[in-house]
Amino acid sequence: MLDNISLYWFTDTAASSARIYWENTRAGFGGLSRGRIELQMAASVFPHEIFCPPKAWAEALWPNLFYWNELDKGGHFAAFEQPKLFTEELRKAFRSRRG
């Protein structure tokens, strides 16, 4: 975590990295109100994330949602907090996409 914070501090990019949060707050619904995304989508919802949309919202805006899973632990930094779960989710989500 300190490496991550140091990277933003020493490169003077903390403000630009926070911009996404500011923009999403102004957009409403955690940024989900910006319209439909037609790409294939997978979602792993960690309970301590900043914003956890209901599946119905995701399905309405992501018509090609092929994977959805709500986990019982983890948060905004899931890859740091729960690396094993995060990796398992990536594998589960994209296993069905293999040709």
Image (spheres, grey):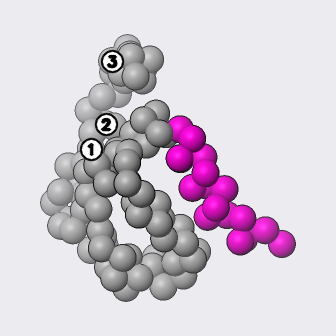
Residue 47, visible in the rendered structure:
yes
Q: Residues within 10 Å of mark 3 (few under 14, many from 20)?
A: few
What residue do we see at 26% from left, 32% from top? 15
Q: Residues within 10 Å of mark 1 (few under 14, many from 20)?
A: few
Residue type at mark 2 is Ser
Residue 42, percent from left and from top: 53, 67
Residue type at mark 1 is Arg
What residue do we see at 35% from left, 27% from top? 13
Name the residue beneath numbered marker 3: 9
Name above or below for residue 59 compared with residue 85.
Answer: below
Name the residue beneath numbered marker 2: 16
Residue 2, percent from left and from top: 38, 16
Residue 26 painted magenta: no
Name the residue beneath numbered marker 1: 19
Is 87 in front, or is 18?
87
Label 1 – label 3 distance at C-alpha: 15 Å
Label 3 – label 2 distance at C-alpha: 11 Å
Name above or below for residue 59 compared with residue 14.
Answer: below
Residue 56: which quarter of the image?
A: bottom left
Q: Which residues are magenta?
A: 83-99
Label 1 – label 2 distance at C-alpha: 5 Å
Q: Which quarter of the rendered picture does the C terminus lie within? A: bottom right
Residue type at mark 3 is Trp
